[in-house]
Amino acid sequence: MSTDISWLIGGPQGSGVESAANIFSKACASMGYHIFGKREFYSNIKGEHSYFTVRVSDSIIRSNVDNVTLMVAFDAETIFRHYSEIIQNGAIIYDSDLVQTSADEVHTIDAPYKSRLAKHLGPKPTIQNALDFAKNNGAKLYPISFKTILSNMADETNNPRIKGMARMYNVLGVSVSLGILKMPPKTLLDAIGSIFAKKQAIADLNKNAATYSYNYATAKFPDFAFTLNPTSKSQNTILVQGYQGTALGKMACGCRFQPYYPITPASDESVFLESNEIVNVKDDRPGSTIVVQTEDEISAIGMTIGGALTGTRSATCTSGPGFSLMAEALGWAGINEVPIVVTLYQRSGPSTGLPTRHGQDDLLFAIHAGHGEFPKIVYASGDVEESFYDTARCFNYSEQYQLPVIHMMDKFLASSVVTCKRFDVDKIKINRGKLLEKLEPGANYKRFAFTDDNLSPRSKLGLENGIFWNTGDESDEAGHITEDPEMRIKMMDKRQSKLDYVLKTIPDDEQAVSFGIEEISIISWGSPKGPILDAIDLLKKENIKIGFIQVKLLHPFPKDRLGYLFKNVKTIIDVESNHVGQLGELIKQNLQRTPNYYILKYTGRTMTSTEIYDSIKNIIANKAKARQVLTHGA
């Protein structure tokens, strides 16, 4: 019998939810299971509701699902937010001291949600009401007193300071979970040791707590229907956090300078790069990336451009509000043909919007960012494994075509924890384009020289005999300012022709990926890829065939490639996480076709495969509106 469970842990922000999920994920991955986890949290340092969902399966998985098999609740809000998601024969592990808590007593629950609770559970909902609802739906209830467990531990180990350690609730919750799931205890202890590897005293304390609570759970709750036994482990599989894909990709492909200004969810990538500044990639390819925290995003992109002008592979990473500040300098890089990479981790806007939540709101903005007309590439990754290799592609594109590349990521990808194939450095090929290493005396170097392919040999600052001029004004071949109309036409044509050259020279499968073409086919970009593929797999089991095309090159738009792929498609379903259906707008502009259906989500929460599966079933049954808006997620 196959294993596929969804585990959720929740508590106040700052209570160790993420650490607990990392322990759980490491333990399950070490036994050979595939993992897909995602974190949700408010834009609050401490106190607001935070939760982490981890899906565990003995088959490949690429997404979360709507329902929860086992939930651990440190606090009342977690129960109020997720009680209705527990499946039949699933379970809730909860603090028994909370049962009389009313929704009115939980000050972090907003008024609209309290109103919905009252409609669902009665006029004055309590935790007991929520637990009764779950029990009536077939869920098991496993009450424990976290305080009592810590108190008993303190007495048995003669360590009174343990009694007040509420920050250990996270480890207790994980350990009770894995005890109920009958996972071998050594796996749990090894995972704790890995998480706290640099803090031996803390590791030992948490191992003692884990052992005690694991034994407590196995003795008191032996009747849970689901178990996690060791399974065969796939070769070359790693457990990786989302933002590490692009960070490791930058190390491997030779990015050696990254200025940035902190912003959620992009900061994690730069922090990871900074903490691993010197890494031996392979043989004589050490990775040494200088990371600089600047005073603002304007400085960050300015320094990135400066680094690129020296011949150093340079990048910055940001999110929507920060990218807005970079728009003017992006145009400067465009007119001066400077190869830079901007990793754009999208979140929900506009303005500050939902600063810690997911969205794919910035596609059209990225394409049109900057005043005037200049060439750029906008490229999107669909999952964490893909982002590693795409990062190298983006640097190659930027230097081959001498233009800015915007690498589209998002909060969903950044905060996911997944198992995937180990990144293969040997697959990273570096192409620096027409970068000059030396020039002979008297070469009469012209930085913007007209060539057959409109790509000029690129000098770098300090190169002898390779002197060049840069300015924000229009210039001639040498870089000197000009307002001559004929030169303006030549320079504009030279730069803009790169977009046609990009479409001719980037391989088709790097422009758009086909996962099968059917009369009914989905088109999407970025992070919906995983939920879509999992939904398609579910539909295949019912002999329902759905095609899927993932667009990776979003600007310049690969209309010839997509026109060919869609020539026999009768029904197009556009799936993306924004309100407008921004990819659908590009399809209308470039293919003169309007998607027949839109499946959209803009709640700030990520898509699940369950939602997409249900939406497609509605389309097939002719029960769907042309525009379906997904709403799952607390």
Image (spheres, rainbow, N blue to C red):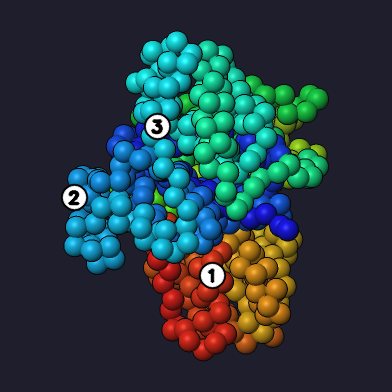
Amino acid on which disc 3 is placed: Phe
The local crowd at label 2, few if under 14, some if 14 to 19, many if 20 or more residues have their Cα within 10 Å, is: some
Label 2 vs label 3, nearer the camera: 3
268 versus 483 height, above or below: above
373 versus 300 height, above or below: below
Q: CA distance from mark 2 to mark 3?
A: 23 Å
User: Which tag, 1 or 3, sits closer to the chain's start?
Assistant: 3
The residue lying at 46 percent from left, 20 percent from top is: 153
Residue 145 falls in image quadrant = top left
276 or 356: nearer the eye? Answer: 356
The residue lying at 48 percent from left, 31 percent from top is: 172
On residue 146, the disc is 3
Q: Is residue 270 visible?
A: no
The local crowd at label 3, few if under 14, some if 14 to 19, many if 20 or more residues have their Cα within 10 Å, is: many
User: Mark 1 highlights which residue?
Assistant: 612
Q: CA distance from mark 2 to mark 1?
A: 34 Å
Amino acid on which disc 2 is placed: Asp
> Answer yes or no: do the residues labelled 2 and 1 have beta carbons within 8 Å?
no
